[in-house]
Image (cartoon, rainbow, N blue to C red):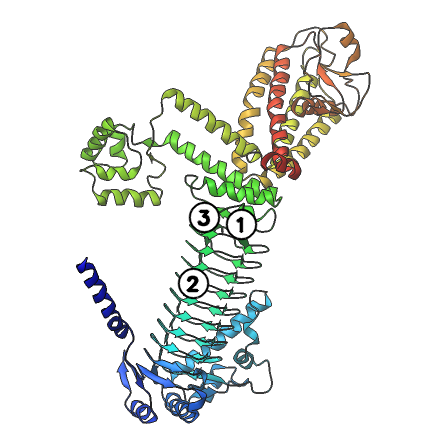
Amino acid sequence: MFLCVLLILLLFLSLPTLAAQAQPERTPLTLELLQARLRTPILREGNLTVDLQKMVIDLRAENASFRDAFYQLLRKELGAKPLGLDLSYALILGDFVGSDLGLRTPLYAQAMSSDKLRGVYAPIFTATEQEELERLRFVCLQSLTMSTTGYAYALPNSKDCRSLLGTQSTPSSEITVFRGVLTLVQTRFNGEVKFSNTFFLQSVDAQGATFLQPTNWTETRFGRSVSFNSANFRQQSNFQGSIFFDKANLKQTKFQELADFQGSIFEKTANFNQATFKQLAKFNSVQWQENADFSDVRFANQVQFTKANFNQFLLLTEATFEQAVSFREAEFNQSVNLQGANILNQADFSDARFATDVCLSVPGLTFNSNQAKILGNPGEIGKMFCIPTLQGNQNILRNLGQNFRQQQQVADANELEYTKQRLRLIEMSRRLAATNINSATVASLIKLGFSATQAEAIAQRRLIKLFRNSSKLLTLADIDLEKYTQLSVDAQRLVVRHRLIVGEPLSIGEWLLQAWSWLALSVLLLLSGYGTNFWLVFGVGGLAIAYFGLLFWLVDRYRRLHPVPIIPTSYETISILVSFSVLEFFSLLAIFRNAEQPWLTLGCIFIIIVPVPMALLLRLYQQGRYHDLMDVSYFTEDGTFRQLRLLIGRLPVIPRNQTFRERYMPLLGDRRWNWLNYYDFSLNNLLRLGFNDIRLRDEHLPGIISALAWYQWSLGVIYITLVLWTLSRTIPGLNLLIYLK
C-alpha cells in the first residue's frame, strides 16, 4: 500500500516536468532581434533561411508599431532575394497576414508570351523563378480549356489567371510571390492566418502546425511540395481555387471546422491519408491530375466531390463516411478504391461519368442498406461495382442489391445479382478444375512448384489433418516463409490462383453434382444473365423460333425429288428464307447488344438446338419417305376458329380421335402465306403462344418428324420457365413483391 502511494506521488510530481518538456522555451521577438536574424541568415538544406524558430511573435493590434515594422522588414528582405523563413515552434499572437511578406508583383495582360514574361520580370526573378511563373500560365490555360468542356469551373475566374490569359484590357490586381522556403513546423497561430493570392515558389512545410483561428489560402499557388502533416485547423480553412503544382501532403491533418478546397487543382499526388474532417468538407470542381489518397480518412460530416475530375486513382480504402458524400457529376478516369470503406449515411454518384473499364472497387465495403443508401443513375450505377471474389463479399452484394431494390432500381439490383452469380461460377470452376492440395498426388504438387521434399511433407501432413487454408503450409518445417510468399505472389499474378485450391476433397458423386450445378448456372448466365436480362432471353427465343420454323417448313414442303417431286414453289422458298434472315438478324442484334459474352451465348444455343435436330433431319432424308398421304401436309390446324391463343396445355400432336380429326384440317400448300404457319407452330411449341392451334397429324406420320416436334416442345417447357422467371425479376412491381421482405 505504501509503495502504491509513493508511486502516485512521484507521478503527480513528474507531471509539471513533463508538461514543461512538451512546451518548447520561446523567446519574445523584438525588432533588434529580428534585424539581427535578417542580417545573418543561416544555410539550411542548401537554402538561406531567416531563423525565427521558437519565437513569440506578437502581432496583435495593441502592438501595432512592432507589427508594421515586422512586415516591412521581412517584405524588404524576402522580396529582394530568395530567402526562406523558418517559424518552427514559434507562437504567433494576433493575425498573421502572410501575403504581406512576399513580393507584390503585377501580372499584366501583356505578359502573354514567355519572352515578354521574362522581359518584365528579368530584373527581379531568376531564370528558375521565371519558369515557375510560366507554369502558372500553362495551368491557367489548361484549366480554361477544361472549363469549356464542363470539368472545371472556379479557377479561370481567379485574378491571376484572368490577367495571364489576357481576358481584361486593364492591369489586374497584384499577386504576392513568396520566393523562399516557408517552414512552419509545430508553429502555433493564435490569430487568423492569411495567405490569399500568394505564389510559393519553394516548398511549404507546416507539419504539426496549429491554427486556432480561420486560415485563408484562397487562390494560393504552391510551386513546390507542401506538407500539412499532423496539422490542426481548429477553425475554417479556405483553400478555394488553389493550385498545388507538386505533392500535397496532408496526412493525419485535423480539420475541426469547414474545409473548403473548391476549384483547386492538384497537379501531383494529394495525400490526405488518416486525416479527420469533423465538419463539412468541400472538394467541388477540384481537378486531381494524379492519385487522390483519402485512405483511412474519417469524414464526421458531409463531404462534397461534386463536379470533381479524377484523372488517376481515387483511394478511399478504410475511409469512413458518417454523413452524406456527394460525387454528383464527378468524372472518374481511373477506378475508385472503396475497399474496406464505411458508408454510414448516403453516397450519391448521380450523373457521374466513368471512363471505359473504370469501376467502383468495393471488396470489404461496410454498408448497411437499412441505414444507408447509394444513389446513382438507374440502369448504370449497378454496372460500376467490381468485386474480385465472392468469398467474403456476399454480404456486400446482398446489401447493395437490397439498396437498389428499395429504390426500385431493378436493373441495378439485377446487375449485382448477375455479378454475384458470375463470381459463384468462377469459384465452382476452380473447385472442379483446380488441384486440391488436400487430394492432389505428389506428382501434381511438384508440377505446381513444390519440391519433392515439400510435396512429400504435404502428403504426410494431410493424412493427419486436412489443410483449411494456404497459411497452414507454414506449419510444415520443409516450407519456409520465402516459399509461401512466392506462392502468394504467384496467386496475385494469377499464375497458380486457378490451379491450386485448399478445401474438402470431392467424391465422384459430389463432383458430378457440382459439375451439374456448374453447367446449369453457366446456361442461365449465358442465355438470360441469370434471369436479369429480358431482351437477351427474347433474342435467344427469336433465334430458336426462326430456326425450328425453317426446319419444319423444310421437312413438310421439301419431301422428295423422285419419282414425283414434292417441293415448294420458288416464291415460298424465297419468302421463308428472307423472313428467316430478318428474324435471325434481329435476334442476333438483341443477343450481341445484351449478352456479356455473345459468342459463348451463341455457342450454347448452337449446342442445344443444332446437333439433335440436324441428326434427325439427316436420318430422315437418308432413309426417305414412303407412306400414305404423301401429298397431304403433316401439320394440321384447328379449323373451328382463328385467334391469338395462349396454349399452355397444348401438345404437338393431335389425339387419336375422329372428332379431333374433323376439327383439325391439313395446312393448304397452295396458299401464298402458308409459310407463316410453320413459324406459328414453332412459336406454339416454344412459347405456348400462337395465332392458331397448329399440330402434327396422328396418322401416317414419320417418327423422326414427331421426335423433332417433341424435342422443340421439351425445350419450350424450359424456355417458358426461363421467360417467366426473367419477367419476375425484371418487372419492378413483381420484383419488389418477391424480393422485399
Q: How far across and down, in percent of the image, does residue 554 sit?
A: 67, 21
Of labels 2 and 1, earlier in sequence is 2
Q: Amino acid at mark 1?
A: Ala
* Residue found farthest to the front: 2
Of labels 2 and 3, earlier in sequence is 2
Of labels 1 and 3, earlier in sequence is 3
The local secondary structure at tag 2 comes to strand
Specify the label residue 372 is tagged with.
Answer: 1
Mark 2 surroundings: few (<14), some (14-19) or many (≥20) residues within 10 A: many
Q: Amino acid at mark 3?
A: Leu
Asked if the residue under mark 3 is in contact with the one under mark 2, i.e. CB atoms within 8 Å, the reply is: no
Q: Which residue is mark 2?
A: 276
In the figure, residue 32 lies in which quadrant?
bottom left
Q: How far across and down, in percent of the image, does residue 450 sit?
A: 23, 36
Depth check, mark 2 against mark 3: the one in front is 2
Mark 1 surroundings: few (<14), some (14-19) or many (≥20) residues within 10 A: some
Q: How far across and down, in percent of the image, does residue 193 sit?
A: 44, 79
Question: Which of these two is toward me, 213 or 118?
Answer: 213
Q: Which residue is mark 3?
A: 365
Q: Amino acid at mark 2?
A: Thr
Picture residue at 55% right of the left edge, 18% below the top = 615
